[in-house]
Structures are given as structure tokens and as C-alpha cells.
Image (tube, rainbow, N blue to C red):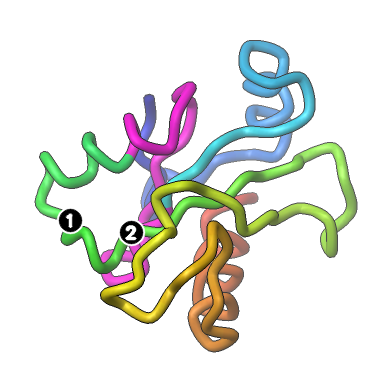
């Protein structure tokens, strides 16, 4: 598992290599929208979530996504994770229901991938 931040960005080519070890066409990622970091290279969003929580992230700031590095810019990010089911935060689906939050996640991911 790796933590990606502004000082340690990740290349698309490295993400593509990770797909071969994981799910063939996607990588599971958890984004901390407050710290503007993301955890990559783990089998489950829950593992990444636990790792980030252990390193000072808050549950309410963590959102699970899938990256498809072999697709174009519009198809790169998929908002789908069991960790996103949070009725207490108004998120009742596996996606990210808040469009502003989606935009924030997209912005963070684009900053961290080179």
C-alpha cells in the first residue's frame, strides 16, 4: 500500500502496472479530502481506509473510488465503494452523492497523478 501526496505523486504508468496485480483494469483508492492524499495499491477499500485512519485521517474525510488508468480522462474515476455508504453523512449509496464532493475528489486525484 502507498500513500500518494503532493510531494509523492504517482505516474499513470505506475498505476497501469498496479492493475496487473489487482483487478486487471482498475485500482482501488481511498481519498482523504481534507489532507488531499490518497491510498493506493491494496485489495480492498476497507484496508486503505483502516491504514489512513491509523495515520490520523478522519472517517468523515475518506471516500472510496476506483481508478481505471487505461481509460481516457472522463473514464478514469469511478465513484463506487462500500465505505461510501454513510447515511449519517447523507450519503446513501456506494457512490459519492454530493456533486461538490465529487469535484473535490476529482481535483485531488488529478493533482496527485502525473
Q: CA distance from mark 2 to mark 1?
A: 8 Å
- Which range of residues does the magenta coloring cover? 31-48
Answer above or below: position of 100 versus 65: below
Q: Earlier in the sequence, mark 2 or mark 1?
A: 1
Identify the residue at image location x=38%, y=30%: 2
Q: Residue furthest top?
A: 21
Decide: few, some or many residues near mark 1? Use Cα within 10 Å; few <14, some 14-19, many ≥20. Answer: some
Q: Position of residue 75 (x, y in %)?
A: 83, 56
The verdict on residue 30 being magenta is no
Which residue is label 2 attached to?
Answer: 62
Residue 109 horizontal/vertical position (percent): 56, 60
Horizontally, residue 85 falls left or right of residue 54, namely right
| Residue at figure coordinates x 23%, y 44% from the top left | 52
Would you say 96 lies left or right of 114 here?
left
Please state the horizontal and vertical placement of residue 43, each as a whole percent of the image: 48, 22
How many residues crowd mark 2 within 10 Å: few (<14), some (14–19), many (20+)?
many
Residue placed most toward the observer, 36 or 79 = 79
Q: Who's the residue at 52% across and 55% down the image?
A: 112
Is residue 6 at all visible to an observer of this figure? no
Quadrant in the picture for residue 18: top right
Judge from the rendering whether residue 3 lies leftward or rightward of residue 14; answer left or right: left
Residues at badges 2 and 1 in contact (C-beta under 8 Å)?
yes
Outermost residue, right side? 72
Residue 94 at x, y = what percent? 54, 57
Residue marked by disc 1? 57
Check the image and report above or below for 106 versus 13: below
Amino acid at each position: 500500500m502507498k500513500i500518494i501526496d503532493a510531494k509523492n505523486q504517482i505516474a499513470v504508468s505506475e498505476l497501469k502496472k498496479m492493475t496487473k496485480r489487482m483487478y486487471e483494469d482498475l485500482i482501488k483508492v481511498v481519498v482523504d479530502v481534507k489532507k488531499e492524499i490518497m491510498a493506493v495499491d491494496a485489495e480492498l477499500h476497507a484496508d486503505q481506509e483502516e491504514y489512513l485512519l491509523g495515520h490520523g485521517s478522519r472517517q468523515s474525510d475518506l471516500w472510496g473510488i476506483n481508478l481505471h488508468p487505461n481509460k481516457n480522462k472522463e473514464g478514469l474515476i469511478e465513484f463506487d465503494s462500500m465505505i461510501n455508504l454513510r447515511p449519517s453523512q447523507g450519503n446513501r449509496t456506494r457512490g459519492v452523492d454530493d456533486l461538490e464532493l465529487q469535484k473535490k475528489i476529482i481535483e485531488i486525484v488529478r493533482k496527485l497523478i502525473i
